């Protein structure tokens, strides 16, 4: 049952990714479409976060999870974990520290930064570089990219519950075990 659930989750993520990739070219080609506007009847496109130049193992598994963190709670990031991740804050605030440089996109200014990048071709204004070992606090709409194989922590220093949507990519494990041999 666990293997089936893992396969089902991976297939669902892959199908969503394929659907998103199929819709992306139509949206990207519309230069005048502001973030959050309808692109086709019933569809909207709103950039939320992105990371450029991420190195992934090939093949890789991609997992998406919603993580709730109560005030004062948190968890460690282990350097033995080869996964890379993107933490998007949906509620509250989250503090992240990684013992390697990381990048942050700020939700409040992402749309403006992307419009400026479209004009100039320079994406650097869309990212905030966080030096190794420095803590960064993310608010609703902000996203932090946490590189693979680093020590660190994610915690809630706020007074209200925080919720993050975590996108994690790591070495393929689940599908390889379930794939029958010819």
Image (tube, rainbow, N blue to C red):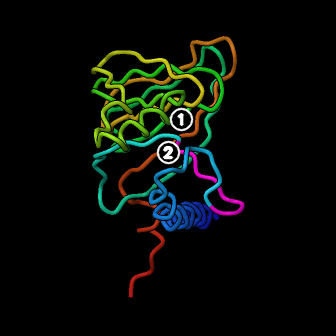
Distance, label 1 to label 2, CA atoms, is 8 Å
For marks 1 and 2, give the one nearer the viewer.
Answer: 1
Residue visible at 37% across and 44% down in the picture:
118
Q: Position of residue 127 (x, y in %)?
A: 36, 31
Q: Is residue 60 magenta?
A: no
Residue visible at 45% across and 39% down in the picture:
86
Residue visible at 33% across and 22% down in the picture:
130
- Asked if disc 1 and disc 2 are in contact, CB closer than 8 Å, the reply is yes
First reached walking from the N terminus: tag 1 or tag 2: 1
Q: Position of residue 51 (x, y in %)?
A: 37, 42
Q: Quadrant of residue 94?
A: top right
Left or right: 127 as drawn, with respect to 46:
left
Residues 122 and 139: in front is: 122
Secondary structure, mark 1, is strand
Query: Vertical placement of 53 versus 103: above or below?
Result: below
Q: Which mark is residue 126?
A: none
**Residue linked to disc 1:** 88
Q: Quadrant of residue 34?
A: top right
Left or right: 12 as drawn, with respect to 51:
right
Q: Which mark is residue 167?
A: 2
Left or right: 111 as drawn, with respect to 41:
left
Where does the N terminus fall, quadrant-wise? bottom right
Dominant secondary structure of the magenta stretch?
loop
> What's the magenta region?
40-47
Q: Is residue 43 magenta?
A: yes
Query: Vertical placement of 178 versus 121: above or below?
Result: below
Q: Residues within 10 Å of mark 2 (few under 14, many from 20)?
A: some
Residue visible at 39% across and 83% down in the picture:
181
């Amino acid at each position: 049952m666990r293997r089936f659930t893992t396969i089902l989750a991976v297939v669902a993520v892959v199908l969503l990714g394929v659907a998103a990739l199929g819709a992306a070219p139509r949206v990207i080609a519309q230069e005048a479409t502001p973030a959050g506007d309808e692109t086709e009847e019933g569809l909207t496109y709103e950039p939320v976060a992105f990371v450029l130049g991420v190195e992934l193992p090939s093949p890789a598994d991609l997992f998406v999870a919603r993580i709730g963190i109560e005030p004062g709670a948190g968890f460690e990031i282990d350097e033995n974990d080869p996964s890379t991740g993107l933490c998007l804050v949906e509620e509250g605030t989250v503090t992240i520290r990684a013992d390697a440089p990381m990048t942050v996109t700020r939700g409040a200014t992402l749309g403006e930064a992307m419009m400026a990048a479209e004009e100039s071709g320079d994406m650097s204004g869309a990212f905030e570089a966080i030096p190794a070992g420095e803590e960064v606090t993310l608010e609703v709409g902000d996203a932090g990219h946490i590189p693979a194989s680093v020590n660190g922590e994610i915690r809630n220093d706020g007074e209200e519950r925080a919720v993050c949507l975590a996108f994690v990519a790591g070495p393929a494990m689940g599908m390889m075990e379930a794939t029958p041999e010819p």
